Amino acid sequence: MFRWWDSLLRVEPDTHLFALIIHHINTDGWSMRLLATEFAECYTAHVEHRVPALPDLPITYRDYAAWQRHH
């Protein structure tokens, strides 16, 4: 499904272009740096046929939801 805000385009048979468009109100420098780093790691791991080496999250959404319910 094509969506205007993100696209993977085939430029040549072995060349692709990935475009991700995010409005500045939805992100900040820290988040974009993290997204770029983790995306690069996931892509590299895919090319190298390995599992991405991403750090464990210190808190999960489940933890946050439980904390929010408690308050």
Image (cartoon, rainbow, N blue to C red):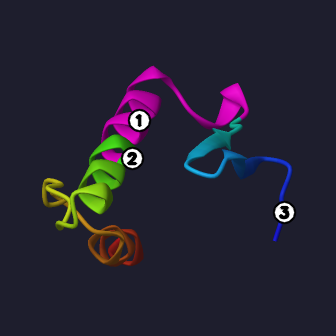
Give the image quarter of residue 56.
bottom left
- The residue that appears at 64% across and 37% down in the rendered structure is 26
Q: Residues within 10 Å of mark 3 (few under 14, many from 20)?
A: few
Q: Between residue 60 and residue 12, name the one nearer to us.
A: 12
Report the residue marked by disc 2. 39
Q: Which residue lies furthest to the front in this view?
A: 13
Side (left or right) of 25 relative to 15: right
Instruction: State if disc 2 and disc 1 touch (CB < 8 Å).
Output: yes
Report the residue marked by disc 3. 2
Question: Quick one: SS at disc 3?
Answer: loop
Q: Residues within 10 Å of mark 2 (few under 14, many from 20)?
A: few
Judge depth for marks 1 and 3 and give the one in front: 3
Q: How crowded is mark 1: few (under 14 residues within 10 Å), some or many (20 or more)?
A: few
- The residue that appears at 18% across and 67% down in the rendered structure is 51
- The residue that appears at 36% across and 52% down in the rendered structure is 43
Residue 50 screen position, x and y as percent: 17, 66
User: Label 1 is placed on what type of residue?
Assistant: Ala
Question: Quick one: SS at disc 1?
Answer: helix
Relative to 37, is 29 above or below? Answer: above
Q: Between residue 63 and residue 46, name the one nearer to us.
A: 46
Query: What range is drawn magenta here?
Result: 23-38
Report the residue marked by disc 1. 36
